[in-house]
Amino acid sequence: MKNIKFPTAQTILLLIAAIVALLTWVIPAGKYDSLSYNKDTNTFTRSSMEGSTTLEATQETLETLQVKIPLEKFTNGDIWKPISIPNTYQEVEPRPQGLLAFFKSPIKGIIEAADIIFLVLIIGGLIGIMNLTGAFDAGISWLAKTLKGHEYVLIILVTILVALGGTTFGLAEETIAFYPILIPMFLAAKYDAIVPLAAIYIGSSIGTMCSTVNPFSVIIASDAAGINWTTGFSGRLIMLILGTLICIIYILRYANRVKKDPSKSIIYSQKEQIEAMFGTTSNATVVLTTRLRLILFVFAMCFVVMIYGVSQLEWWFLEMTTVFFVGAILIGIIAKIQEANFVETFVKGAGDLLGVAIIIGIARGVSVLMEDGFISDTLLFHSSNLTEGMNKGLFANVMLFIYGGLSFFIPSSSGMAVLTMPIMSPLADTVGFGREIIVNCYQYGMGLFAFINPTGLILASLAIVKVGYNKWLKFVIPLVVILTIFTMIALTIQVYL
């Protein structure tokens, strides 16, 4: 048994894709009609299996369709994706996904996730250039001396800052850029690679789970539920503060244990391999020159510009990728790297993250199988019927787990919002509490499962650090249990307040 290794991230995802393909043969196919707004013609398009019809973009049209969302949410661009129309679910001709569809799914997924994949590859190239300049080694050496005896500050700062990014603009995929930078810093501080992985990934997860002003989750979900996003804000803010505090304490306890006794590390057997991979043995004597300071400044500004663009200028993956590409060129010029050497290093750096990019594509392929097999809406329909007749305390907690389960199949927060909110949010009216509770269930359910969701970002993140999924589960499951109990108590209190 000791010779049996836990499968790689790619294999895990392909197994999941195979299971999903099999499910399309078992679960009945079904579809909700969808409604999308056409800005150019100021009309709605209602799409169904029979075809599409054009409708007037008026509040009366929405009321007729039992879509309880203000018209301006469509016209001002708050809702830009097609939403599901309540009470329109119908079973359709089965679309089982066979062997050919299974083999096509990762390819389709890679094509669909091309924007994220190119971001990852360009970041890989940038990291390669940064490593060539020696700026990272010099910066890490300086930081290690500055924080000597107070290395725990790094854990607190990183977790809080990433959580703030998650709660404000949905910092998630972008965190992939942070791992190659921060892991050497944490290793130099005598922690293991699980600690920076946890600070970044858990920080992002708790931030997005307790989104306060995140346009890709709380705002679009509230809009699709027909309420103002500020409704329930204070409850989510309290959840963010307390949830982040729980996560920081959990990470610090593990980190201190590893620092005192490295053999306590969950990945102790990989210690030498990871340290060699992230080059932490050579940074002690590197001097932080003025040129290297300028290079680090340009590198840091890439993230500042990216964050400003995403949060203020409605940038998305194309613009973010461009920022890192330009940053790599500027750094190459400042470091006076020869053109041929620059290209070779950039390509090699991108190649180092190719495995991560493929994982992202295969994960998207799972969603492709779901969509092509028409089983997403079937799961949504039966989930909405599951809570019928429950008291409101039980209802909220069951809804929490329903959203956790659905996020395995629909890991996109904005996709989940527009698909489910028009169906799920009216259930709040029948139970007797505000629709913001459904929005909270959606956020908390997706957020809790995101800590371990193999169709989300965790496998791509683990691939960068070369840490197995089984090792991550061993580390994070106790935290997930603690947060789940905490969330269930908080939800129950919110329901009865």
Image (spheres, rainbow, N blue to C red):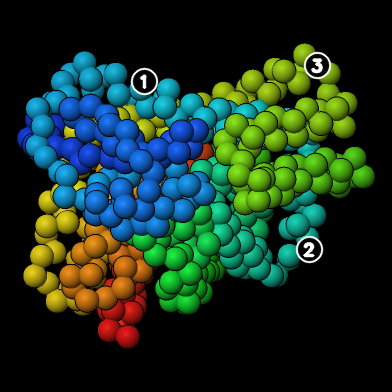
- Disc 1 to disc 2, C-alpha distance: 47 Å
Q: Which mark is residue 339?
A: 3
Q: Position of 393 compared to 367: left or right?
A: left
Q: Which mark is residue 107?
A: 1
> Looking at the image, is mark 1 or mark 2 nearer the viewer?
1
Q: Residues within 10 Å of mark 1 (few under 14, many from 20)?
A: some
Q: Is residue 47 visible?
A: yes
Please report the residue visible at 77 percent of the width from the left and 14 percent of the height from the top.
Answer: 340
Q: Nearer the viewer, residue 346 or 167?
A: 167
Q: Amino acid at mark 2?
A: Thr
To which residue does mark 2 refer?
146
Please report the residue visible at 61 percent of the width from the left and 44 percent of the height from the top.
Answer: 314
Q: Is residue 194 visible?
A: no
Q: Nearer the viewer, residue 135 or 357?
A: 357
In the rendered image, which quarter is residue 109 located in?
Answer: top left
Secondary structure at badge 3 equals helix
In the rendered image, which quarter is residue 177 located in?
Answer: top right
Going from N to C along the chain, the mark reached first, 2 or 3, is 2
Q: Is residue 201 above or below residue 349?
A: below
Please report the residue visible at 51 percent of the width from the left and 43 percent of the height from the top.
Answer: 173
Q: Quadrant of the N terminus?
A: top left
Q: Quadrant of the C terminus?
A: bottom left
Q: Position of residue 50 (x, y in %)?
A: 18, 27
Q: Residues within 10 Å of mark 2 (few under 14, many from 20)?
A: few
